[in-house]
Amino acid sequence: MSVTFAQGFSAAGVAAGISSVEGKKDLALVVNNGPLDVAAGVFTSNRFCAAPVQWSRGVVADGRVKAVILNSGGANACTGKPGYEQSEATAKAVAELVGAQPQDVAVCSTGLIGELLPLDNVLAGAKAAYQALASDDQAGADASHAIMTTDTKPKTVTLESGAGWRIGGMVKGSGMIAPQLATMLCVITTDAVVDADLAKAALHAGVETSFNRIDVDGCMSTNDTVLLLASGASDVQADPDEFKALVAKACASLARQIIGDGEGASHDIRIVVSGATSEEAALACGRAVAASNLLKCAISGNDPNWGRIVSSLGTVPQDVAPYDSNKVTVDVNGVRICENGGAGRDRSEVDMTPREVHVDIDLNAGDAQATVWTDDLTHEYVHINADYES
Amino acid sequence: MSVTFAQGFSAAGVAAGISSVEGKKDLALVVNNGPLDVAAGVFTSNRFCAAPVQWSRGVVADGRVKAVILNSGGANACTGKPGYEQSEATAKAVAELVGAQPQDVAVCSTGLIGELLPLDNVLAGAKAAYQALASDDQAGADASHAIMTTDTKPKTVTLESGAGWRIGGMVKGSGMIAPQLATMLCVITTDAVVDADLAKAALHAGVETSFNRIDVDGCMSTNDTVLLLASGASDVQADPDEFKALVAKACASLARQIIGDGEGASHDIRIVVSGATSEEAALACGRAVAASNLLKCAISGNDPNWGRIVSSLGTVPQDVAPYDSNKVTVDVNGVRICENGGAGRDRSEVDMTPREVHVDIDLNAGDAQATVWTDDLTHEYVHINADYES
């Protein structure tokens, strides 16, 4: 399913010999068959951004994308000019196959940092993927498998507007980053009739409240890319507000799936900060708590350690988030274990057995709130990231 | 040894029944016998700062401290007004014993957050410590033991100026923070003749390049306190520059010992960022690298993963640290594994067996540099912070 749920898209996922895992599907192609070729993109802000990010940023700039080629098995990051030339050559090859200009073909890569791709395999794989293109569920599923690295399962979304248009999507992100593997790639498709401005606005807003509010290990990738492609194939003009809402919902679903597949994670942690003077203040507090290794370890040990929650909150400067530390309350899974900045009900009352843990912080300083998701920090996380031999 | 190495100080460490570990020394007393009672202090910037920090900040404000009482076994943090009253009552009791004003007695606590101290035990312990006060090596050693929590060994320093004055010091800090335990307490003593301004300037400068440049897990404690006490007992006026240099050296030695005793740590990681446009820029880059869980996991697995180093560097905004990502080099233990922002020599050439790992980053953008220390992230860290039952 995934990206082919929206009309006007064909996709494929093939094994091209890029990944070191023999026989693994490692190359995906998504083609927008129109009539529109509207697109928007959001990319990593990492200064060591990968060659495909540099290439695709230019492609998306004019709000038009005809096709996206994605590979796992190599990030093509920190590879200099030769790496950029690989992305360019890949786009050219796809453009020739699908009858487009190279500057209408986006390229996404994920995998090892610092190594060039086996370009011959990529180009041969592109041809094979082109031949395999289809618009059925299986084609979408194949594409979502081909972008997986350390993900344990494909992550997809399908949404339908009552007005007669659809959204499909797939994302790759293991929640935690295996050695030298770069992390998130996402393609969202829609058959709604939208223009580039609306696509851009909807994608940026959707990413802001989803992918930008999950923090698995505080590590920003060199390759993060989120693309939105609109074919217009439903022939239905989308209501802008509904479109933004559904794109945001698609992003939120995919982001939640990343958290749910965090390698080694035993708990998905939802942190809601309310009672803030502004959304930015709430967000700063939520991010500070989500970044605490100590809290993440405690939760992996089923300990609702509110001391680690408030000591993280306390690192947010007063001018960023005004609040009185003596008025803060913290509930974990519905039990108010911190009241007025001090001990509340006994933490032994908290049931920590569910995988999803709810940390609800009330700053009692205003009316704004924000939600941030993270995973716990487990032995398995260290194992994956320390002992894994790449 | 430790704080009693400088003349004019007596100290003691006793078991007062505050710690849950039966018979553990858990209360230390350090008294400045003068003739001077000059002092300076640096405290946590955490907004959930503990009661003893709130109390001691007021004590140090006038540049005079006569005695310091320190306890492990309880942080007295997030305990509201009753907690503050405990710190005040403790200071009053010590003041009466040593013949000083309560506002000349600093109080430091470390241990569980969110619980009041067993005040009767603290007050009885203060009396016992007062009776045990001595100026010999054993007294200093006892004090340094009494402030330990999850530290595996006491951490002390002794330095001597050719001019005839001395510095002694002790610090508590396990590198990583066990459940709900707050972290660093430090007392540095000197018999040099200095005024409060010089003491303050020397301590702030010393802390800035030592304790403020170690990052074990990015978690700021509610109780961090560093005190410098000067007795003037050597009767030697310290040269200001030499005084600052030796205080900085004492801080650096103690900070290095904290890193060396990081629970669970298998490597101490020294990150030197050079070629920066300013020290602040170098520091921002060093801190970003030191905060990377992925890098810290990789190093615990003996993997000199330069991809994780540059992807952390890449998160520092251009306006904070101007540099060209294509000119960055990274050496690990002397092997240049990243050159011009891409792959350099093969990382298999790096010998990762030494406990101390040197990460040398050259931004090739200027002449400034900064050094940051951190520990690796190991299974044992997660074990201590997740599975430990408090």
Image: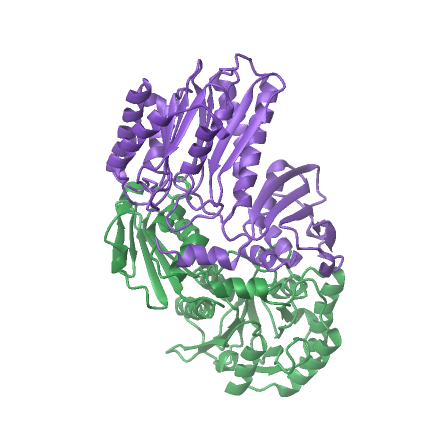
Chain colours: A purple, B green
Classify residue A283 as left or right of residue B17.
Answer: left
Residue B252 appears in the rendering: yes
Quarter of the image where one finds residue A11:
top left
Q: Is residue B173 above or below residue B163?
A: above
The x, y position of residue B291, in whole percent, is 45, 53
Q: Is residue B143 above or below residue A343?
A: below
Foreground: B157 or A264?
A264
The x, y position of residue A90, in whole percent, is 29, 30
Residue B197 appears in the rendering: no
The x, y position of residue A133, in whole percent, is 38, 25
> Residue at the location (38% across, 43% down)?
B314
> Residue at the location (36% across, 43% down)?
A111
Classify residue A256 as left or right of residue B51.
Answer: left
Q: Is residue A329 above or below residue A192?
A: below
Quarter of the image where one finds residue A76:
top left
Foreground: A69 or A301?
A69
How many numbered badges does the structure rendering display? 0
Foreground: B204 or A170?
A170
Foreground: A208 or A297?
A297
Classify residue B32 as left or right of residue A151.
Answer: right
> Residue at the location (36% across, 38% down)?
A26
The x, y position of residue A128, in whole percent, is 31, 29
> Residue at the location (49% across, 47% down)?
A218
